[in-house]
Amino acid sequence: FDRNSSGLRAPSKASFGAEFPLSRQAHSLQLALAVDLGGSFIRVALVDDRGNIERMRRTEMVDCPDERIAIIVRMANDLLENKRDLVVGVGVSTGGRVNSETGEILFATKVLSGWGGVALKTRLQEQLGLPCYVENDGNCAALAEVHFGSHKMEDMVVLHFGTGIGGGIIQDGCLLNGSSYSAGEFGHIVVCFDDGPDCMCGNSGCVEAYAGGWALNKLAKEMELSSNWRKEGADDQKPVTPGQPNKPTYLTDLASDGVDYAVQHINRAVRAVASALLTIYSSYNPPVAILAGPLAPVYFDGVKNKLEERSAILGRNFTLLQSDMTEMSLKGAATLVLNNPSRA
Ligand code: BMX
Ligand code: CA
Ligand code: ZN
């Protein structure tokens, strides 16, 4: 099995410390312990170098950073039992801006409270005794698409619609981190400067504050409060897609039932996403943008139509695609450990 069969270069070499030289095997016996810290859940899994998930544990996200780390360590040790010899390292996908060289969290929105400043790589290495690599979750989604997806491209952007909106930029086959690890934080592209809704990051008018899962949930709650009405049998905890836990379905359910307020809001969210994509196009000129994650199907057709209205800007050299992958954060986290040719 050739890890480089896609012809893609390694995600930025600088992301991978050289302190743990590991030998490569020609077959698929190596496993990564992959950790996903999203807005709603902590998940830990064993993933092989073809992106297959062997075992997974999941629990709800908690507010306290120390408790978060303790939970990861507990679930990891549970999964490592009898498998430790096959596991070559820990790959962590987390919300927030991450210094992927030091594995420190630089900044996180209120969704992951207290996470900024946490030396995650060091702490997990100490407690698990395995080399650890940490990267932003939108970046991991992009790496997953590059290594295991059906749209392997040298240049593309990925937008992942979950609790928040994560993003990743692949340029010349490499992940683009930016001068201070903030490239591809697409959720915080400001689409309305003056009167936009407040965002979890501290700004207002970010695309995530219109179209992120948490924003849809917040609106559904506001709608209930203002109208003193709740749909019979409504379940605002219901996952969007089985296996992709998230909680934004209540508003999208209402929109598909034709409830006016919900329909209007989804249309507003679609315009916000289309607007963000125009900014991304003008900044990076990618040939392809891939919409991924549980909310991608809600927005895809509407966004495509809106972009067609602006074809004067986009020209003919731009394609909007939808990812067919699930569990992108976990799979991308595994590539930090397993699909790194610089380790050869
Ligand atoms: C937020 C931000 C991003 C992240 C995105 C998607 C934090 C904690 N998160 O914009 O870094 O990529 O959410 O995250 O700062 P998710 O919660 O949908 O997985
Ligand atoms: Ca990102
Ligand atoms: Zn924001």
Image (cartoon, rainbow, N blue to C red):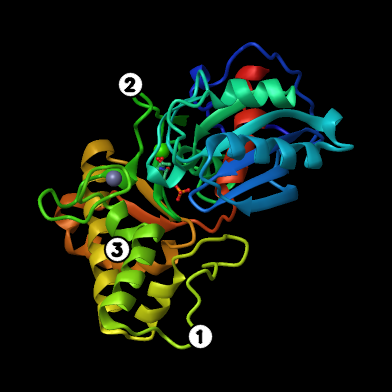
Relative vertical location of residue 268 with respect to residue 7 in this rendering, above or below: below
Q: Which residue is mark 3?
A: 303
Relative vertical location of residue 259 with respect to residue 290 in this rendering, above or below: below
Q: Amino acid at mark 3?
A: Val
Relative to 46, 100 lies left or right: left
Residue 131 in sight in this render: no
Q: Position of residue 163 (x, y in %)?
A: 44, 55
Q: Earlier in the sequence, mark 1 or mark 3?
A: 1
Relative to 333, 220 lies left or right: left
Instruction: Please give the name of the residue rendered at 48% of the width and 64% of the height, measured from the top-left corner.
Output: 247
Front disc: 1 or 3: 1
Instruction: Please give the name of the residue rendered at 41% of the width and 57% of the height, measured from the top-left corner.
Output: 321
Front-most of residues 154 and 207: 207
**Residue lying furthest left:** 194
Q: Amino acid at mark 2?
A: Ser
Please rate how many residues cluster around mark 2, counting C-alpha atoms within 10 Å: few if below 14, some from 14 to 19, many from 20. few
Residue 241 figure quarter: bottom right
Q: Which residue is mark 2?
A: 179
Q: Earlier in the sequence, mark 3 or mark 2?
A: 2
